[in-house]
Amino acid sequence: MLYRPSLRSIWTLIILAIICSGLYLWCETSRVKHKQPFYEEKIRSANLMERALRAYQEATAEKGVFTESYKDPRLDAVIGQQFSLITTEMGIFEAKLSSANPNFAAVAVDLLGQAGVGEGDLVAVGFSGSYPGVNTAVLCACEALGATPVTITAVGSSWWGANDPDFTWLDMEALLNKRELVHSRPVAASLGGLNDAAAGLSQVGRELIREAIRRNNLDFIEEKEISNSISKRFELFNAVAQDRQYKAYINVGGEAASLGHIENGELIGNGYHRRLPLQNYPARGVVHLFNSTDVPVVNFHDVEKLSRRYGLGGAQVPLPSIGRGQVFVAERYNLRVAGIAAAIAVLLIIVLVRLDSRLFKLREAGVDPDTLM
């Protein structure tokens, strides 16, 4: 008769379970915190974004710009109204709140770091007026990494974005440059919205956007066909770079000319892409033109998903303190403790199995193990 390990003694199993549970708890309670890559740059960018939010607040107070109250002064200027004369489409309130978290700038640092962006690099950015929080995070990340962002903005905004005609994203970016919080190079802007032509927006709204572009002294991209708008953007980016190569192209939101089609944001997916995924794209935009020249793409499409992926949680009011989230520090198992615990568990099982085998042999020999006690 062959021996088969049984460990049938209930007390043996209970003792084994207690010891293994204790070893597991030892591993769990001995976790260690590890700083994530680019930790210093992430902290720097988050602090910079906090200063940027306060700069927006001060500017709106000085200009008498109407803002909603969100129980956190840092939010009041970066979260717009639901409706305005330059509101082009619907939006998700929670996404706007998530993007206003100063720690989201650390997410931008992480993604740009994956793309290899560093000191002295040029980065091309397609901004949307719909996400002033993400826009600010990107600028602060570039500043922390020492890169220069060259930006083109689709000014029109969805609900709760930078949709105040007197304080558009162009005005916000200009304010940050004026206060030397960031050093970006805005070169042009368009109406934004459907087909990058603000289709459905009133003539008054269109003129207000044009006025915002004029007062910020930017080239106005106004083409009848979106394909021409895409080509114009690419030409302007290349004209600024001259003979230099962009280190990355960053898309923010679902801007039509930048992506080529609103559905492309989902098809491409969030985050860093050395090569864009092979998909049946409805149309091709600036992201595709850059990627075809070996420039990697960083896509900020679904802000809430990105926020949760990096451990920042969802929308929060008031905003959390700087440095909170797995994007800064991650907990990991202590490998030494885990190794010792695993060795103890294996050794214990071997001892119990051998003991069980010995008792089995005694029974086979007709000896009652209890008589040996």
Image (cartoon, rainbow, N blue to C red):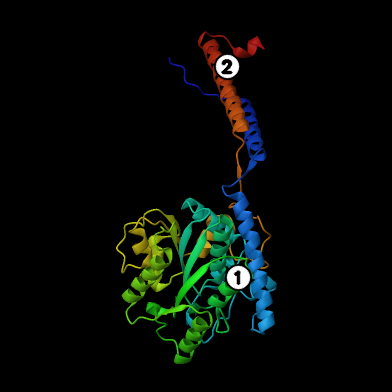
**Image quadrant containing the N terminus:** top left
Using the image as rendered, state which of residue 122 and residue 63 is in the foreground. 122
> Mark 2 = which residue?
355
- Is residue 263 visible from the viewing direction of this image? no
- Is residue 67 visible from the viewing direction of this image? yes
97 horizontally vs 124: left or right:
right
359 horizontally vs 115: left or right:
right
> Mark 1 = which residue?
176
The quadrant holding residue 308 is bottom right
Q: Where's residue 302, x and y in %?
A: 48, 64
Using the image as rendered, state which of residue 360 and residue 246 is in the foreground. 246
Identify residue type, mark 1: Leu
Q: Nearer the viewer, mark 2 or mark 1?
A: 1
Using the image as rendered, state which of residue 346 and residue 257 is in the foreground. 257
125, above or below 34, in the image: below
Q: Where's residue 283, x and y in %?
A: 31, 69
Residue at coordinates 60% horizontally, 23% vertically from top-left?
Answer: 348
Tell me which numbered mark, 2 or 1, is placed earlier along the sequence: 1
Badge 1 element = helix
Badge 2 element = helix
Residue at coordinates 36% horizontally, 59% vertically from top-left?
Answer: 291
